[in-house]
Amino acid sequence: MSVRLQKVLVANRGEIAVRIIRSCKELGIKTVAVYSDVDRHALHVRLADEAVPLGGANPLESYLNIEAILEAAKRTGAQAIHPGYGFLAENPQASALCEREGIVFIGPPAEVLRICGDKSTARERIMRAGVPVLPGTGAVSDEEALEAASRVGFPLLIKAVSGGGGKGIHLVREKSELPSALRLARGEAKTSFGDERIYLERWLERTRHVEVQIVADHQGRIVHLGERECSIQRRHQKLIEETPSPGLRPSLRAKLHEAAIAAASAIGYINAGTLEFLVSGEEFYFLEVNARLQVEHPITEMVTGLDLVKLQIRVAAGEPLGMNQGDITFHGHALECRISAEDPHRGFFPSLGRILAVREPSGPGIRVDSGIYPGMEVTRHYDPLLAKVVAWAPTREEAILRMRRALEELVIVGVDTTVPFHLWTLNRPEFLRGEYDTRFVEERWARREREGAYETEAVLLAAAAVHLRGRRPLLSISHRPPLRNAWRSQ
């Protein structure tokens, strides 16, 4: 039975909150923003029909405060809550409390989130469905981990049972490293997720990270929306994504899509979600379920013409998908670059400060999902993601050229960003050939710095930044950064 939603509370911040508000407006749905003290002037607050303060900058006082968010929903008459990604998006308690209060949670039901959040349980169910899974364990004690490690094999990963977003993961290459790594992993898991349980999983050295987007309704229909290549990553955090994957043969692509549907069915999945896989040659292995909207969902939207946020809302309201697998078509190629407030020349160290000016790229095939504005303060309290630049074109080669052009137009003054890394990557021969794996950043970017390429490139990039700003004054001379750091605007 479907529910007509007239008002949705967006329980998030930044670019994803802006993204959700825009889709709600296109559906004729009123929106309620929530915000912490430091976000009171944020773009998502300005765009929403109503806004409710939550508390301090610490996420526990604001965006993770389930009780305060539920109270805001009831006070404003919001019939549903969209959690976006991060914060409460994969929290089964949040979904269960919404159900208890008669509020629609725009995401999977609580029971599905419990299964997906318990990585070891999800692995077992999906393995029983015939989907290949890497050798590993369920949740283990330290003693059991020491005993199981030889059976799993080295190198291996220690992973948090409730982990996600690349957090709570430790690589162990030999047995002597295991005891200290277990202590670190449990401590990080408890701090990040409130759950110190861990499990072990075999680590493959040379793999690609490929994920498949699925959407499932309450009537039992599941469709896939193609795959995304996510191998350009650092410490399990993705930096560049593209679709379709340039590294898959048609037969392997079809098998991955089938495996994703089988895995989603095995856990009774509902709403939008992503099945992540490691690909090694012609073999692939299930990694985990991301039971939420992914950061990189725009590239799937660009090649399918579908709006994933609208699909999420309709499914959560009880509506059927209204389409079969054969109704979904894929056109062209899309890439996404995550623009973060980090200095790639200093180990991607976070860059904090006030954004003084912004100029976003535009033009054919370019999309920017952003929540930034002049005067915005980039603080230590939240994820450093500032914006996502997306490029679409009929071919991969054209999409890469469009992305380069867009990044050269992008100006963000006041903090360092990852744009120099993105531009460098988009010019690498191995990237252009589509021949890269998850070690790309660790090996290629690190080697580049060791070889002393930084100084030469910095001068060129700084000159380019000054040239861009020279076309249209953005700042008074007194506010411009010195030449050596001029590409902080990029």
Image (spheres, rainbow, N blue to C red):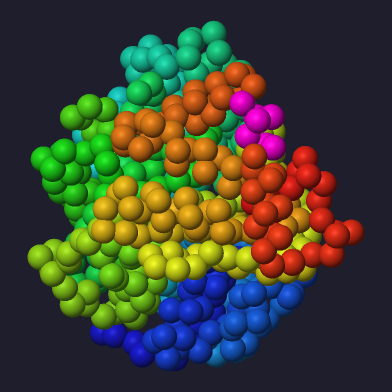
Give coordinates of residue 358: x percent, y percent.
Answer: 67, 65
Q: Residue at x 27, y 33 (%)?
A: 279
Give, as a single range, the part of the protein colored magenta. 453-459
In the rendered image, the quadrant that contains the N terminus is bottom left
Count of number-bearing discs:
0
266 and 133: which is toward the camera: 133
**453 to 257, vertically: above or below:** above
Give coordinates of residue 338: x percent, y percent.
Answer: 52, 51
Q: Main secondary structure of the magenta part?
A: helix
In the rendered image, is residue 283 in sight?
yes
**345 to 83, vertically: above or below:** above
Choose top left, top right, bottom left or bottom right for residue 6.
bottom left
Q: Does residue 368 appear left or right of residue 434 in this picture? A: right
Q: Does residue 476 appear left or right of residue 134 in this picture? A: right
Give coordinates of residue 432: x percent, y percent.
Answer: 35, 38
Give coordinates of residue 144: x percent, y percent.
Answer: 44, 20
In the rendered image, is residue 72 in sight?
no
Determine if the magenta segment contains residue 431: no
Q: Does residue 361 appear left or right of residue 284 in this picture? A: right
Q: Does residue 203 appear left or right of residue 388 in this picture? A: left
Q: Which residue is drawn at 81% across and 51% down?
A: 481
342 and 71: which is toward the camera: 342
